[in-house]
Image (cartoon, rainbow, N blue to C red):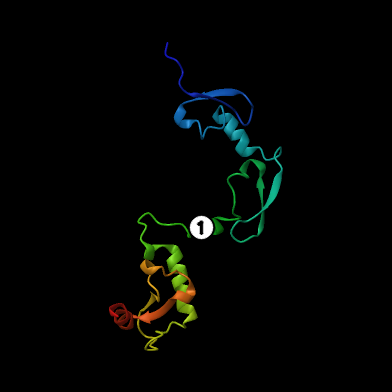
């Protein structure tokens, strides 16, 4: 008979020991689907606790067993918080962070090119000091420019 190469865990519902394969060692919590169902449906024996949302700060209630997983009061806050993450392609100008700071700069400049003062062209947000030269992505290093003014500044 082959030796068992898995892991022995304790069920979070009934406390019984159970065996799982090594690939499930980090995710398995219950010895059976019955124990998992009991955990999901038995709200009477678990008291809710209050926590503040990590994004908006609004208090919300959750079960003690979800403390390590739930940080946000809603899917909306979770999505907003996750939008600061870097997308798969890692291209700077496709990041949500850049799109948000770009919108802040455009609003600050009144959706107007800061060189020719036009408002009817598509605007770019230009780094005064380029990122490769140590320029930052802060508002004071960014300026709104139309395409033609942006091309002129790039040539200088």
Q: Residue 84: horizontal and vertical position, in percent? A: 48, 60
Name the residue beneath numbered marker 1. Answer: 79
Query: Can you say whether 111 is above or below 100 in the image?
Result: below
For this orientation, the residue located farthest to the left is 155
Number of marks: 1
Nearest the eye: 93 or 83: 93
Left or right, 33 with respect to 21, comes to: right
Q: Secondary structure at mark 1?
A: helix
* Figure quadrant of the C terminus: bottom left
Q: Is residue 116 left or right of residue 103?
A: left
Structural crowding at the residue carrying mark 1, measured as other residues with C-alpha within 10 Å and reported as few (<14), some (14–19) or many (≥20):
few
The quarter of the picture where the N terminus appears is top left
Q: Is residue 108 above or below residue 135?
A: below
Residue 142 in the image: state x and y as whole percent.
43, 75
Residue 49: x and y, percent?
A: 70, 47
* Left or right position of 150 against 12: left
């Amino acid at each position: 008979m082959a030796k068992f190469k898995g892991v022995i865990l304790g069920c979070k519902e009934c406390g019984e020991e159970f065996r799982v394969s090594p690939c499930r060692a980090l995710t398995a919590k219950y010895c059976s689907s019955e124990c998992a169902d009991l955990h999901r449906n038995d709200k009477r024996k678990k008291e809710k606790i209050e926590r503040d949302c990590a994004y908006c700060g609004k208090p919300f209630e959750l079960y003690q067993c979800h403390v390590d997983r739930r940080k946000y009061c809603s899917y909306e806050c979770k999505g907003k918080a996750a939008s600061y993450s870097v997308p798969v392609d890692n291209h700077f100008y496709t990041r949500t962070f850049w799109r948000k700071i770009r919108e802040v700069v455009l609003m600050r400049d009144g959706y107007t090119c800061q060189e020719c003062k036009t408002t009817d062209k598509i605007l770019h947000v230009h780094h005064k000091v380029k990122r490769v030269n140590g320029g930052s992505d802060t508002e004071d290093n960014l300026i709104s420019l139309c395409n033609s003014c942006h091309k002129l500044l790039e040539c200088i």
